[in-house]
Amino acid sequence: MGLFNQKDNLEQESQRAEKEVISSIIDQKMVITGKLNFEGKARIDGTIEGDVSGEHLILSESGKIVGNIQVSTFVCHGTLEGNIKASLVNARKTCHIQGCIESNSLTVEPGAALNGEMKVASSELHLVGCNETKSGEEESQQTQQQG
């Protein structure tokens, strides 16, 4: 029963994000360096060099973010070099993501380029360490547990 409630909540979040009007736009000619925090729905057509946090984020085909993202919903058409922490992530066919994705729901269109670690359907979201490597002992323990 908990699984269906979570699915319903994700669908409601997705519908709410789709209906919300875009309240902020970073133009294609703009470059912002530093942290970006916003409320509502934002679309990035330009470049952000820094972390982004807020509610609903759309990264357009011309958009680029070099930094981490922490939002409720993230629709990516552009380029991201950083980690994502979001309830819903939608990787469109034109997107390029280099980094870790942690989400309760991940949708990937054919043609999307993803390079990194993915953690989906987690009850608690926390950023995973992409650069962390498992020791040989940890890997053998996991292999034994799976076997």
Image (spheres, rainbow, N blue to C red):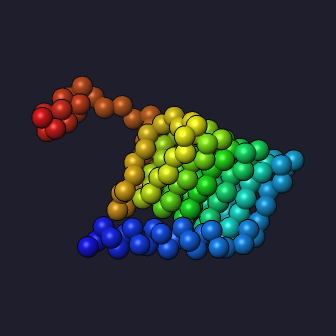
Q: Position of residue 66 (x, y in %)?
A: 66, 42
For this view, does 140 lie left or right of residue 75? left
Q: Is residue 111 above or below residue 102?
A: above
- Residue 39, image quadrant: bottom right
Q: Quadrant of the C terminus?
A: top left
Task: Name the residue at 65% across, 73% down.
Answer: 19
Q: Position of residue 139 (x, y in %)?
A: 23, 31
- Residue 43, image quadrant: bottom right
Q: Position of residue 64 (x, y in %)?
A: 71, 44
Q: Is residue 67 above or below residue 9?
A: above
Task: Name the residue at 67% across, 57% down.
Answer: 58
Residue in the foreground of this view, choosing between 49 and 42: 42
Residue in the foreground of this view, choosing between 131 and 23: 23
Give the farthest residue toward the top. 136
Whether residue 67 is visible:
no
Task: Name the residue at 61% across, 42% down.
Answer: 93
Q: Position of residue 74 (x, y in %)?
A: 59, 57
For this view, does 147 lie left or right of residue 23? left
Give the farthest residue toward the right. 29
- Residue 52, image quadrant: bottom right
For this view, does 5 lie left or right of residue 96? left
Q: Quadrant of the N terminus?
A: bottom left
Whether residue 120 is visible:
yes
Task: Name the residue at 48% across, 36% down.
Answer: 116
Give the farthest residue toward the front. 110
